[in-house]
Structures are given as C-alpha cells and as structure tokens.
Image (cartoon, rainbow, N blue to C red):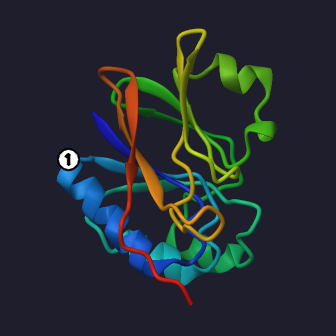
Amino acid sequence: MKLGAIADTHDNLPAISAALGVFERAGVEAVLHAGDYVAPFALKRLLQSRLPVHGVFGNCDGEHMGLAKLLPSLCAGPRHLELGGKKVCLVHAWESLTHEDIEASDMIIFGHTHEPKIERHEGRLIVNPGECGGWLSGRCTVAIVDTDAMAAETEEVHEQARS
C-alpha cells in the first residue's frame, strides 16, 4: 500500500493542492497528515480529494473544534492505525511518543521539525515528510511511503504561494 505523508501545511492552499497532485500521480491510497493544518479551510482542501485522510493535531492548530468538525477522527495523537498490514503511529512531535508507542509500531510518521527525514531504526521505518507549507525552509515536501517495501521517498512539491 502506498501512503502519502504530509505535515506542517500551515494554510498554504496551493501547496496542499500540489501535494495532492503528487499523491495522485504516485498512486497513494491514503493520506496521513502529521498536524499543523492551522485553519479548517486548509483541512477542507485536503478533504476535497477522494483519498481517505488520517490526521492528528499539531501545536499550531488553533481551531480544534472547526478542524474536528471536518474530520471527526482527528485527535491529539499519537494515533495508532493499521494500514497496508503495518502498525502505523502518527504524531506531530516526536517528543510526544512514549517507549510503548514506538515499540507498538512498524512505522512512525511525524512532523513539527519542518525537516524531511527518512530512516530505519530497529526495524522500524521513521518518516518526517518535512514541511508542505514551505514557510520556514522555502521547500515544500511530502513523502510517499510504501508499506510493502517498508520504504519512503521525499518528494518536492513545486507549486506554493507566498503572501
């Protein structure tokens, strides 16, 4: 199963739209957002795709009620899911994980640092897709995760807006 990992979109609607294009071209079957949508309109754009969306809140998500109204399964995280036969832990900040969360997971997807990272640790795949918003680094990135291969690749998202 291919998953689209995204985080730290920070209201950048053109980048969210471009990320969805990357996911569609890659054949992604579900989107995992590791938090920091910021406002409900950013999540609404993500939900306009036909892909199932799983997510957690980030530290900059100010309108929890509005976000949760759009995606009732949205939670503070860590959130544990089974996708593609793998135990996936979705969280915004790595520091929020307990030892038990890590041990219970085949893969961990997180955000918060705005820096892409893909590594394997003790048989687990650890993925930070970087920031899709592009506000801090000037780079908009997402990750494509393959649960069968237990591998991931960071992808550049080339359309973003600056205001």
The answer to whether residue 85 shows anywhere in this view is: yes
Quarter placement of the N terminus? top left
Q: What residue lies at 68% left-to-right and 23% top-to-bottom?
A: 102
Figure check: 48 above or below 163 = above
**Residue 46 or residue 113, whichever sits in front:** 113
**Residue 8 or residue 87, whichever sits in front:** 8
Secondary structure found at label 1: loop
The answer to whether residue 126 shows anywhere in this view is: no
Residue position marked by numbered label 1 in the rendering: 27
Q: Position of residue 39 (x, y in %)?
A: 62, 80
Q: Amino acid at mark 1?
A: Gly
Q: How many marks?
A: 1
Figure check: 133 above or below 105 = below
Quarter placement of the C terminus? bottom right
Q: What residue lies at 71% left-to-right and 54% top-to-bottom?
A: 76
Q: Position of residue 105 (x, y in %)?
A: 58, 23
**Residue 51 or residue 140, whichever sits in front:** 140
Left or right relative to 146: residue 38? right
Figure check: 91 above or below 103 = below
Q: What residue lies at 51% left-to-right and 67% top-to-bottom?
A: 71
- Circle 1 packing at 10 Å, graded few (<14), some (14-19), many (20+), is some
Q: Position of residue 161 (x, y in %)?
A: 46, 82
Figure check: 149 above or below 21 = above
Left or right relative to 16: residue 10? right
Q: Quadrant of residue 126?
A: top right
Q: Quadrant of residue 58?
A: bottom right
